[in-house]
Image (cartoon, rainbow, N blue to C red):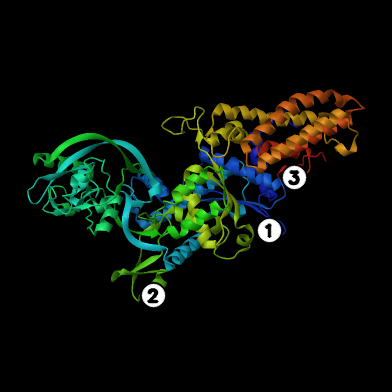
């Protein structure tokens, strides 16, 4: 053996060995229950970050452990097309490198070029996963836009539409004027901003005075169709039913009563703008009020508001409206007001809620069985505390807007009759739609929310809706491991769609990891300058060191603090494993089996202690306490085996009477420690194993707590 563990040369070589011997590809064995993890698919357009390194470390620990236990273990890798995120990313790239927009390319060419770009970046991303040691089955890798996956997505859309679970409707959506698309509630970044609460006088038509309405958005008043008060508010009891003159317009609007109005906000009287506020939209439905859209898709005032406001950006129009109201003496006062405002998660643009015709999933029928699956324990959450968060959201869930006004992704499989756009059909092709509708057709320009295809991920990756051998054997999967911040984006939707599409839970357990933070506990970001690039860390210290730095001392559901210093320290551990092996094999390269030698009381005591470590470590692994498990085997190997046992036994290796027994004890602990350590430091343990033993450690047998 060389003097030190050369991770730079050995890690790639070892990974190639694993792939060559097919160590990652399980065989279907009807006599054995499989252990299955479907990889949360990284976005295909960008390189991996430290959060990806954490999920790789955690999931790889799981699959390597269960593989060592002799279970058919499948870790299925993949990549996500990431609709809006990829489109925004590629648009910026086009502008930077070629000075053009997607509109100059046109939809067909833009999609074609982005697909080619993704093919290249996916290959880079897959090789990065290899560098991190991900022992996933590359023979089964999937992409959310693969033809078979896409076919399953369209099949699901049609099935849900035919059964009344998908519908087209006009609802308030979160609209990003920069990305030019609607977003689901989960894609909104709510930020506290300092605004102004303006108290505006709305005169009564009969000249009897005015009502004062407090608003943060006076520019939307052109879309007001009522002023609402709480029916129990005594201040306004006699005013309900009267008519107001809407300032700056010729329209008249009623005073109405609705329970949803907060008596303590502003004056207790609120303007109702149904086309630009979700609460107002609901009020309008109860009172049969019209909806007037006054801000368009570009974030500008619509033509309907008339001169001089039409065409102005909303913020610009706000200043003009305020100035005009003040001239008319209709502004009572203005006060500073801190409130939460939605921003686009992708580009940071302030969102405009407005009424739009979109495709929605009716959620209530899907949510009930998904709630029951967790309540009854069919799906277990680790840590359990996330169940409460899940139930709270699921019990208050709203219908899901699944259409996006972007070009990249699964195009909505709906076709409209060119001569009558109100006539449409859900179909697999334009030809099928043309026959069905009896004339020329156009496909819906929208694409599906990325999370729609991702919600089907645990089973579309296995060949569903076809009854493939993989689907029959590996589904339902065992564990879904993911960060807790996407419990609603992804986990809840996978549970709902899994139960709906297959009649079975998609997995029996959800393991939540935390977020990765710096050594001070701060969120990692470019602006803070505390980025820890996992690929740079692998190049400097090796994948084993990075993995130990991310895992040891952490617990499920808790955030992980990481630093370069911490990672550097674990590089020394990989060397310690290597050097311990060099010493143990110096006098006895292979050793003798412990049942072939006579052991003294101290030997038995040492082996019993090691058996206890095996038992404790196994229980920690079964309980998914990987941080504690990593810490236990690290402490035992370095501070007990290396610092104490080897030191105690090393002189006995030169004693003819004790050399065989001493060597047998050391070899037994070393060989089995390599197996115990393998899920945590796979490269160093395999490198040592290749020097000393037959076969590969990745497919060895997990030790029992009794000496063998």
Q: Are marks 1 and 3 in contact (CB under 8 Å)?
A: no
Q: Is residue 246 left or right of residue 351?
A: left
Image position of 592 (left or right of 342): right
Query: Which label's residue is closer to the chain start, 1 or 3?
Result: 1
Question: What percent of the width, then of the height, locates residue 584?
Answer: 79, 30
Residue at the extreme left of the image, as rendered: 207
Pointer 2 residue: 436
**Mark 2, secondary structure of its residue:** helix
Going 46% across and 47% down the picture, which residue do you hit? 45
- State the image quarter where residue 644 is shown: top right
C-alpha distance separating marks 1 and 3: 19 Å
Of all residues, the one furthest to the right in this rendering is 657
Q: Earlier in the sequence, mark 3 or mark 2?
A: 2
Q: Mark 3: few, some, or many residues within 10 Å (few <14, many ≥20)?
A: some
For the residue pair 279 and 529, the one nearer the viewer reads as 279
Q: Is residue 620 left or right of residue 157?
A: right
Q: Quadrant of the N terminus?
A: top right
- Label 3: state its secondary structure: loop
Above or below for 455 versus 64: below
Dot 1, crowdedness within 10 Å: few (<14), some or many (≥20)? some
Can you give x and y, in whole percent of width and height, for residue 108 in the image?
38, 58
The residue that disc 3 covers is 700
Q: Position of residue 154 (x, y in %)?
A: 46, 63
Asked if residue 352 lies left or right of residue 203, the reply is: right
Q: Which residue is mark 1?
A: 28
Inter-mark Cα distance, 2 to 1: 43 Å
Circle 1: element type: loop
The residue drawn where x is 79% and y is 23% is 647
Horizontal and vertical percent position of residue 642: 74, 27
User: Image point 83% across, 41% down: which residue?
Assistant: 708
Frontmost residue, 256 versus 553: 256
């Amino acid at each position: 053996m060389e003097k030190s563990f050369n991770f730079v040369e050995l890690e790639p070589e070892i990974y190639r060995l694993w792939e060559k011997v097919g160590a990652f590809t399980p065989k279907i064995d009807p006599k054995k229950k499989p252990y299955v993890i479907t990889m949360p698919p990284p976005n295909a357009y960008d390189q991996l970050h430290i959060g990806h390194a954490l999920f790789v470390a955690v999931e790889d620990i799981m699959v390597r452990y269960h593989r060592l236990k002799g279970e058919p273990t499948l870790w299925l890798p993949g990549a996500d097309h990431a609709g809006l995120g990829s489109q925004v990313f590629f648009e910026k790239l086009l502008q930077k490198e070629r000075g053009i927009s997607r509109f100059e390319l046109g939809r067909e060419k833009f999609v074609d070029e982005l697909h080619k770009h993704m093919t290249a970046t996916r290959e880079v991303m897959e090789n990065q996963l290899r560098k991190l040691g991900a022992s996933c089955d590359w023979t089964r890798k999937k992409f959310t836009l693969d033809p078979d996956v896409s076919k399953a997505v369209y099949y699901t859309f049609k099935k849900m539409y035919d059964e009344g679970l998908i519908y087209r409707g006009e609802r308030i959506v979160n609209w990003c004027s920069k990305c030019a698309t609607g977003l689901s509630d989960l894609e909104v970044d709510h930020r506290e901003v300092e605004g102004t609460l303006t108290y505006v006088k709305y005169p009564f038509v009969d000249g009897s005075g005015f009502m004062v309405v407090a608003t943060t958005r006076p520019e939307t008043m052109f879309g007001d169709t009522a002023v609402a008060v709480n029916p129990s508010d005594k201040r306004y009891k006699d005013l309900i039913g009267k008519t107001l003159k809407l300032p700056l317009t010729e329209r008249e609007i009623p005073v109405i009563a609705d329970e949803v109005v907060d008596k303590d906000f502003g004056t207790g009287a609120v303007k109702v703008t149904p086309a630009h506020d979700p609460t107002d939209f609901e009020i309008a439905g109860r009172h049969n009020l019209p909806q007037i859209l006054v801000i368009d898709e570009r974030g500008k005032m619509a033509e309907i508001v008339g001169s001089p406001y039409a065409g102005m950006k909303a913020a610009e129009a706000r200043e003009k409206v305020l100035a005009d109201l003040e001239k008319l003496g209709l502004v009572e006062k203005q006060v500073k007001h801190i409130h939460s405002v939605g921003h686009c998660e992708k580009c940071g643009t302030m969102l405009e809620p407005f009424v739009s015709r979109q495709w929605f999933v009716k959620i209530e029928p899907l949510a009930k069985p998904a709630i029951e699956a967790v309540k009854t324990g069919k799906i277990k959450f680790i840590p359990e505390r996330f169940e409460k968060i899940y139930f709270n959201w699921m019990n208050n869930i709203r219908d899901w807007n699944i259409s996006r006004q972007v070009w990249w992704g699964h195009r909505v499989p709906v076709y409209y009759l060119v001569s009558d756009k109100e006539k449409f059909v859900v179909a697999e092709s334009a030809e099928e739609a043309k026959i069905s509708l009896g004339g020329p057709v156009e496909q819906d320009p929208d694409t599906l929310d990325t999370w729609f295809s991702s919600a089907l991920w645990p089973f579309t990756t296995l060949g569903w809706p076809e009854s493939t051998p993989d689907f029959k054997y590996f589904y339902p999967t065992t564990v879904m491991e993911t960060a807790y911040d996407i419990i609603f984006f992804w986990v809840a939707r996978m549970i709902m769609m899994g139960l709906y599409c297959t009649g079975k839970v998609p997995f029996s357990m959800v393991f939540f990891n935390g977020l990765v933070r710096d050594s001070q506990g701060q969120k990692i970001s470019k602006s803070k300058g505390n980025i820890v690039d996992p690929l740079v860390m692998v190049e400097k210290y090796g994948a084993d060191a990075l993995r130990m730095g991310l895992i040891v001392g952490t617990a499920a559901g808790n955030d992980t603090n990481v630093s370069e210093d911490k990672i550097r320290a674990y590089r020394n551990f990989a060397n310690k494993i290597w050097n311990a092996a060099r010493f143990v094999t110096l006098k006895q390269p292979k050793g003798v089996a412990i049942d072939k030698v006579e052991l003294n009381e101290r030997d038995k005591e040492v082996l019993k202690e090691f058996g206890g470590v095996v038992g404790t470590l196994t229980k920690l692994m079964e309980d998914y306490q990987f941080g504690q498990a990593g810490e236990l085997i690290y402490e035992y190997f370095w501070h007990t085996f290396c610092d104490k046992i080897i030191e105690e036994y090393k002189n006995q290796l030169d004693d003819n009477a004790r050399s065989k027994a001493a060597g047998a004890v050391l070899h037994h602990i070393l060989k089995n420690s390599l197996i115990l350590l393998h899920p945590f430091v796979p490269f160093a343990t395999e490198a040592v194993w290749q020097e000393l033993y037959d076969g590969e450690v990745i497919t060895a047998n997990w030790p029992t707590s009794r000496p063998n």
